Amino acid sequence: MWLPPLLDLACLLAFVWGGRSSHGIDGDGSWFLEVLWPFAVGWYAVALAARLYTARTQRLARLAAVWVIGLPVAWALRAVALDRPFFTTFLGVSAAFIVATTGGWRLVGLGLGRLRRR
């Protein structure tokens, strides 16, 4: 029960870390938390409301709800709290990375589960 939220957190951490290297960010670790917290709050607030980690039915629909609602919440938090503009490129890259990684580990897990059952 604890593994899915941790794997999702790993995806968010990887997104932030990847942004660091692609944007040449240096300095202390405060930048990391500053970039991470809007995504973590947006993701987990909607994930909890959608019961992503507790319900056993409609898992894909619940995940899609987190993608469709949680990411815009994260972007809004980032824009308002951190005074960061909305750039379409950033929205596209962040959505693509987070959807690919959070969906990707689930697909891998589903495939491994099917292989194990054979």
Image (cartoon, rainbow, N blue to C red):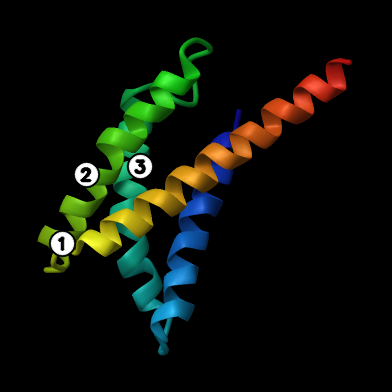
Q: CA distance from mark 3 to mark 2?
A: 8 Å
Residue located 61% across and 27% down the image: 1
CA gap between label 1 and label 3 equals 18 Å
Residue at horizontal 35%, vertical 42%?
43
Which residue carries the number 3 mark? 43
User: First in sequence: mark 1 or mark 3?
Assistant: 3
**Residue at the (35%, 23%) spot, across then down:** 50
Identify the amino acid type marked 3: Trp
Image disc number at residue 73: 2
Q: Position of residue 17 (x, y in %)?
A: 49, 70
Q: Nearer the viewer, mark 2 or mark 1?
A: 1
Mark 3 or mark 2, earlier in chain: 3
Task: Tell which circle, 2 or 1, labels the residue nearer the N-terminal end.
Answer: 2
Q: Which residue is mark 1?
A: 86
Q: Position of residue 44 (x, y in %)?
A: 37, 39
Q: Mark 1 and mark 3 in contact? Answer it, CB < 8 Å.
A: no
Q: Nearer the viewer, mark 1 or mark 3?
A: 1
Q: Given the image, on which type of amino acid does mark 2 rest?
A: Val
Helix, strand or loop for disc 1: loop
Question: Compared with residue 92, is residue 46 higher up or lower down, i.e. above or below?
Answer: above
Category of crowding for the residue at label 2, using alpha-carbon neighbours closer than 10 angstroms: few (below 14), some (14–19), many (at least 20): many
